[in-house]
Image: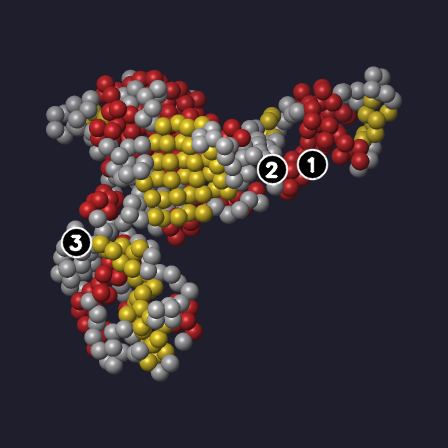
Amino acid sequence: MKKFDSYRENNRREVKKATDKLPNSVWETYSSFANCRGGVIILGVSEDRDGRWNPTGIKDAASILKDFWNMINNPQKVSKNLLTDDDVEIETVQGNQVIIIQVPLADRSDRPIYINNNLMNGTYRRNGDGDYHCSRAEVQAMLRDAPEETTDMKVAEQFDLSVIDRDTLSAYRNRHRAWKAGHVFESYSDEEYLRVIGAAAVSKEDGKLRPTEAGLLMFGHEYDIVREFPEYFLDYREMLDPSIRWTDRLQSSSGDWSGNIFDFFFRTYSKIIRDVKIPFKLDGIVRVDDTPVHQALREALVNCLVNADFYQPQGVVIRKEIHELIFENPGTIRTGKKQMLRGGISDPRNKNIMKMFNLIGIGERAGSGVPDIYSVWDRQGWEQPEVEERYSPDRTVLTLKFDFQNPDKVSKSQDDTLDDTLELLVKQKLKTNKKMTQVQLAKELNISTATIKRVMKSLSDKNEIVRVGGKRFGYWDIVS
């Protein structure tokens, strides 16, 4: 009874009466759960209009269970059986026997799970509390995700290398050179380079070197990209002033820039971090401006792009609002939401594009991107991020909440740690030259005069430094 009651709290559950026979609708629900997030089917229970459950029981649970196993193992009825004996059990509730079936999310290689030997008309998904027929586009999206070879590895047969924007490629090569100086790829011609990074491949049709879909997306022009991906669209929207619809906007279709993924990433990233405080961080005595927050924002942006299904509608949308930053990409989560939040498994929808970002030092931590973002937000003391999967059309949405109108807001524990470091450095500097001014100290430590004034006031309040004499001829005495 306790376990039965716990299922009431699970919004991915379906109850069916099933008094004396196995209901046909159980297979639609099996398909919908297997193609979405998994769920629990309970046979022998009815549901009132107000949502209350009434155990009605099953007259012969063993017989119905036998019918269930016979049918789920029949490929003419169900495309694949995902269940083991441990996933199905009989439980007694208020003196009535019920059957509990726990359906897992199918691996992407097995999706779509369909029934009645009908791929296009027998594939279902969950929508609220009901099952619905998947559209042809949804079925095709699942089929694209099934193979190990991702679609961006395929050769874009209708194009030659003239579609590659050479300015974008040059910018990419410069970043690669800066990240990995002396890399063996540096000496390669552009054609060789495109091939080794996965942006070009030899066509099996005519033996010529042609761009891959990844190369087209990463380095092509928008007007060529949409010939291969009609739904391709990249959109950055900044809405920081309620009186203005857009305070800034960047669209791949604007025609005044390349519109490709590489250029979009860096143009958008610079806009995202523009209002984010760069907390003071030291590596030795050198200031470091790349903080965990910045790294997390890069991870969020690159994850959005490398997991996008560019064949699906609505495109990639990044929204920067007063209190949150929202990343939306077409396509569901290939590993499932639960596994993505757990981390440890890297399964990007666009493996070649992921490889290209990796080569320039972006998105290197395989399978840990989203958990790392959660960890950074937790350390900052900000509200936990939210991940949402939507269907029909398929979309994945990551929402990061923090206040862009107050970019100086960082967690107190972080400020305390930074100030402790600065106080130590200030005292070290003053020990070598007690007559250093606040302006000189700020310049030496590469920080603002406002920060140095705050740090020195703290030291003075704690009686760790004392000013002896006036501004012009005085000096700082180190007390402790």
Residue 437: where, in percent of width, then height? 76, 20
Mark 1 and mark 3 lie on one chain; the one further toward the N terminus is: 3
Which residue is rendered at x = 76% and y = 34% of the image? 458
Which residue is rendered at x = 19% and y = 46% of the image? 136
14, above or below 105, in the image:
below
87, above or below 123, in the image:
below
| Label annotation for residue 121 | 3
Looking at the image, residue 355 sits to the left or right of residue 80; the answer is right
Looking at the image, residue 237 sits to the left or right of residue 138; the answer is right
205, above or below 150, in the image:
above
| Label annotation for residue 353 | none
User: Badge 1: how crowded within 10 Å, few (<14), some, or many (20+)?
Assistant: some
| Label annotation for residue 420 | 1
Rendered-image quadrant of the C terminus: top right
| In this rendering, the label closer to the viewer, 1 or 3 | 3
Which residue is rendered at x = 19% and y = 24% of the image? 159
- Closest to the observer, 373 or 190: 373
Q: Secondary structure at mark 2?
A: loop
Kind of residue at disc 2: Lys
Residue 153: where, in percent of width, then height? 25, 34
* Quarter where residue 356 is shown: top left
Q: Secondary structure at mark 3?
A: loop
Looking at the image, residue 240 sits to the left or right of residue 306; the answer is right
State the CA–CA distance, disc 1 to disc 3.
65 Å
* Quarter where residue 81 is shown: bottom left
User: Badge 2: how crowded within 10 Å, few (<14), some, or many (20+)?
Assistant: some
Residue at the extreme front = 243
Give the total number of marks visible in the rendering. 3
Mark 2 and mark 3 lie on one chain; the one further toward the N terminus is: 3
Residue wearing tag 2: 409
State the CA–CA distance, disc 2 to disc 1.
18 Å
